[in-house]
Image (spheres, coloured by chain):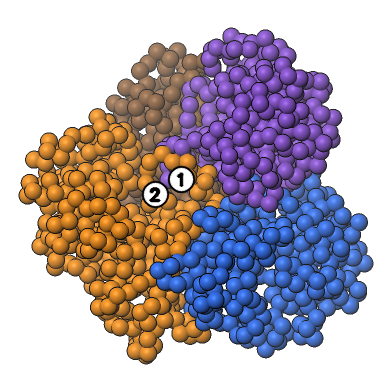
Chain colours: A purple, B blue, C orange, D brown
Amino acid sequence: MLDVGIVGASGYTGVELVRILATHPQVRLTVATSRQYAGKTIAEVFPSLNKRIDLCLENHSVDELISRADFFFAAVPHKTAMDIVPQLLAAGKKVVDLSADYRLHDQAVYEKWYQPHSSPELLAEAVYGLPELYREDIRRARLVANPGCYPTSVILALGPLLRAGFLEPTSIIIDSKSGTSGAGRAASAANLYCEVADSFKAYKVGGTHRHIPEIEQELSLAAKHDVRVSFTPHLLPLSRGILSTIYATLSEAGNNADLHKLYNDIYASEPFVRVLPAGQQPATQHVRGSNCCDIALERDHRTGRIIITSAIDNIGKGASGQAVQNMNVMNGFAEETGLMGAAFFP
Amino acid sequence: MLDVGIVGASGYTGVELVRILATHPQVRLTVATSRQYAGKTIAEVFPSLNKRIDLCLENHSVDELISRADFFFAAVPHKTAMDIVPQLLAAGKKVVDLSADYRLHDQAVYEKWYQPHSSPELLAEAVYGLPELYREDIRRARLVANPGCYPTSVILALGPLLRAGFLEPTSIIIDSKSGTSGAGRAASAANLYCEVADSFKAYKVGGTHRHIPEIEQELSLAAKHDVRVSFTPHLLPLSRGILSTIYATLSEAGNNADLHKLYNDIYASEPFVRVLPAGQQPATQHVRGSNCCDIALERDHRTGRIIITSAIDNIGKGASGQAVQNMNVMNGFAEETGLMGAAFFP
Amino acid sequence: MLDVGIVGASGYTGVELVRILATHPQVRLTVATSRQYAGKTIAEVFPSLNKRIDLCLENHSVDELISRADFFFAAVPHKTAMDIVPQLLAAGKKVVDLSADYRLHDQAVYEKWYQPHSSPELLAEAVYGLPELYREDIRRARLVANPGCYPTSVILALGPLLRAGFLEPTSIIIDSKSGTSGAGRAASAANLYCEVADSFKAYKVGGTHRHIPEIEQELSLAAKHDVRVSFTPHLLPLSRGILSTIYATLSEAGNNADLHKLYNDIYASEPFVRVLPAGQQPATQHVRGSNCCDIALERDHRTGRIIITSAIDNIGKGASGQAVQNMNVMNGFAEETGLMGAAFFP
Amino acid sequence: MLDVGIVGASGYTGVELVRILATHPQVRLTVATSRQYAGKTIAEVFPSLNKRIDLCLENHSVDELISRADFFFAAVPHKTAMDIVPQLLAAGKKVVDLSADYRLHDQAVYEKWYQPHSSPELLAEAVYGLPELYREDIRRARLVANPGCYPTSVILALGPLLRAGFLEPTSIIIDSKSGTSGAGRAASAANLYCEVADSFKAYKVGGTHRHIPEIEQELSLAAKHDVRVSFTPHLLPLSRGILSTIYATLSEAGNNADLHKLYNDIYASEPFVRVLPAGQQPATQHVRGSNCCDIALERDHRTGRIIITSAIDNIGKGASGQAVQNMNVMNGFAEETGLMGAAFFP
């Protein structure tokens, strides 16, 4: 049994980690921190976990916690993560960091989109935690930077086409839509039920969302040249789910290729990526609560474009599910352990 | 491994059975029938189950199917169930029937609220499938009548008070609210998204819902005298979830009793019934997708009434989750096998 | 043209007043206050009102505003209202107060459920603003106390039966369900989209909600004796709408009466109260955005109870719509002016 | 008073016409047809209109109805409209047709995307009913083809840029999202509450939606050269609302222009088109139930693209609101009569 700690267990990604780990057969959750709810049991704060986990939330420093677990999830906001992760590593622990702090390889890019980095020396070591791309590196990693939710939906969808050289490099437009849990659990007027329900809108329009450098880093690595994208996020009246609709112009090689075969070959043995048959479209409902990413490809013969759609649960494959997948890989567990539950329907 | 068949696998309760059984370690799903989708794989009809189960839906007669499984769920409407269950039993199979056909012990009552019964001789044998009440009978049963969704939420909530003799017998009023999945998956104008979303209403007002005789049968058995209730169901703009708010006048004995202790004692060792601490109220969100029933008790000192609230997932503890729980008991499996997943939040 | 001011224009009831008044042909909105958004135009804060009203939100004291309007709505929380209303009256203005501060006739009752009252001398003068009951008093009033949302749905539904003496006095149970806009627009974790959507629960169970004394005051006046009720509010995953399901035991006289005729006679000429034909149930969708209250009556012959259901929009007839109706009556305008818009469907 | 008839009054666009006309001061609704509900009053079928309109739905032939109104709305599906409109015109009536049958000027294009046209001689006469573009033609028209919902959101958003020659002609990508009322009121399993709620997906991906030729016709007229677009519709878990997110590459002239000024100048005097200030994004909530179209412009300096977002109510400005606007123009009424109601919030 692996003793696991969660730093930041009372946010939406934190409680999802708790939920998944509660039925994971090779893990024991021994530490869960929360500033806001310290002293309360998890079941008091999250009644859904009543009779499923018996643990008290704490607000101790990393120093005090560090001996009580062998493996840690950092589920705190960026900037806060930078203050914790180096300590955990220094004490010999392995870490999956769910924040953005170690996702970008280039310190200058990080500092342009976020703020100064206090442990830039770790950027080279940190592995980008998308197991479908970097499984072997993750297996050997001490520090895995868990991908952002939007980037996960985009990179899994576009990677195969870019690696194959099938796209016009400047043609990529990504129109993404996310449920509101991505905004977190802090009190807010903008995210009140009455402001989100019965509505739909775009936000951070014009190339300003912080997931852009992360998307471009990984797409550029796939394409082996610089890729720049247009990316527009939207807010769905849903708690969970991301659907990305991606437009790109096919190169001549792409136009002549069997794209479904390409994707089916690449993802055939992946338990969490599902390439849909022609004519079927992913829906957020079919991945909700799961660690799956569903992908569809359609050509628009009138314009020579391809439209790739991909759906994930932003808290599942887009955060906590993927974090547990990474933990499994880092610890030699079967990769799908604890993650094979399907979305319930309806 | 137990080979299991589902008759009626493409309705909402059918697909939930498939989902639960897909990760059940002691069961192999070998047969799943559907008139509408025969010939398609489950994954084609329910993309959420893609890469999770590999089985084709069929439309064969019971005769043709019967040898291919040892245990059957009948997940078809009442009246249709009566045509299938006797055949399955005659072939030596054990059955959990999710319809209303074998829930009422009294043929006359059944025929008053439903229609003529074609196998009334089975009514005496069938066990009412609420494991928290009838666990030992279920263990020995060939035929278990899985309870209705509303009745499950009511009987677990009121049973302890009635068994203890703590209520004025004519005082019970049950105001229940259900998500719309209870209405099933048939094409319908009344259940279109646009007709249900953004709305809330009562239906079958005035003591006309068919779950009333089932509720009264079990409450009367608990009270050891006839109990008659007012019951009003409502339609929530939700897919899943039932919340029942139950009002009753406490007898003098009830007024002096420690009711939280009563409930805590009765349900302490039950994995699926959770009595909430004073001041906390159940919410459908905390049981969604799970097999749990959350119960709270509050006294109204101004009126001498007690208000009991209980929440279940109408497809979980209210149908398919409970059906699997019954299957576990009938087959000597650990009762909670496959059912310990908690509701995800949010 | 009547010059009208709104104190507290940026809450949910405030902006609904603005919306209704924007098309009211006999009114000019000249003052609208907001502490939080002072200096912004209404259209900046509420884009729905762009090109519909051109007015700036201000944060001036009542002294500074008072000369700029002849009629005021106080749309601020209770306790804050007490600080403003006496000033407005002293300056000779007429006022509709949407808070609870002047609804209860008995100072002791107010102070038991709320806090000390700073202008108790006005309680005797204030008219309870339910035009269907107190139209003539409202016509002559300087100060109208606009009813609470739950009480409006209950009093219109129960009043005729109580006035006729058709109910057993201790038998009344009110199970009410409200959309979440009733909780207001303040930043809050409990009312985030993710906490309210996909869920349903009761709150303030056990006779503790502050609308109880208001309901009992008006029901007692109708019955001409003290009435005590059980009242349980619930939170719906909706922005707008209240449905109250009310249970009571009919007296012998009630049992023999034609109740539909009773209600139809009383409400026939009311433009905003609609008695539904037998068999039809009110739905919040059909009153959303309107000033209507829909009422249905069904007997439960098995238990001798009557079940009355009533639906309103909690911000419409439950707050701002009713407030404008009161303003119309107080100023001699046709009562339905500006309020005849029907709920859109779907 | 203009006597008005609605052919097809019981669909979602039909009932919205009824709702708007019920408070229109210059119109009397004298005929409303429905095959399904003939013989029932409008209030029986749509309880929201109880005490607001007193009219019976009928199922008479056009011959029988034609003398009872001077002006007709055809709110029936395409193909059915072709059978009715010529008769109405032949009898000297003016018509707004809400179907697609007279929107396309080119018979061949119509027949490629729909089916053979039975009255192609009317295509040249029919005026495309977007008053912001064709107000003078509409004023003189006998037959107005009311635009599709998606096209309305796109043409108002893109028209100014194309007329100014500010876009690269092959660069336009339109990612549109619509509420589910667009799918109509027919019984359907795919549009059940449980299938649409909690989900989001694309449909008709790859350039196959029938609104494409309509969009391209109008954009080509604006640009004065052929425009071909990528268009992907999505289904939102909302009853009402369309948001289109439109991407295009700016030409050099476009890059140097003040685009906000361009839009503000064009739409300044339009009562129903609102250009948002920089930094504000349209939301479907702010136009719901209204006849407004909200438009925002943002440049993406990293890619040289412009992103235009526009929001309408698909039943309001996208159908019935616009149809009444056309009726107003055709009859010399003030264009905004009956249409100035703002969306309620929340």
Please say if B34 is above or below D116.
below
Q: A238 or B187: nearer the eye?
A: A238
Residue at x 67% of width, y 13% of height:
A123
Which SS class for mark 1?
loop
Residue identifier under label 2: C183
Chain hosting mark 1: C
Relative to B12, D92 lies left or right = left
| Crowd rating for badge 2 (residues with CA inside 10 Å; few <14, some 14–19, many 20+) | some
Q: A330 or B226: nearer the eye?
A: B226
Residue identifier under label 1: C191
Q: Quadrant of the image for the N terminus of chain D?
A: bottom left
Chain hosting mark 2: C
Res A87 visible: yes
Which SS class for mark 2?
helix
Residue at x 42% of width, y 51% of height:
C180
Q: Quadrant of residue B167?
A: bottom right
Q: CA distance from mark 2 to mark 1?
A: 8 Å
Relative to B161, B299 lies left or right = left
The reply to whether callout 2 and callout 1 are in contact (CB within 8 Å) is: yes
Sequence-wise, the earlier of marks 2 and 1 is: 2
Q: Where residue D16 appears, x then y in whole percent?
A: 38, 56
Relative to D212, C317 lies left or right = left
Mark 2 is on which residue type?
Ala
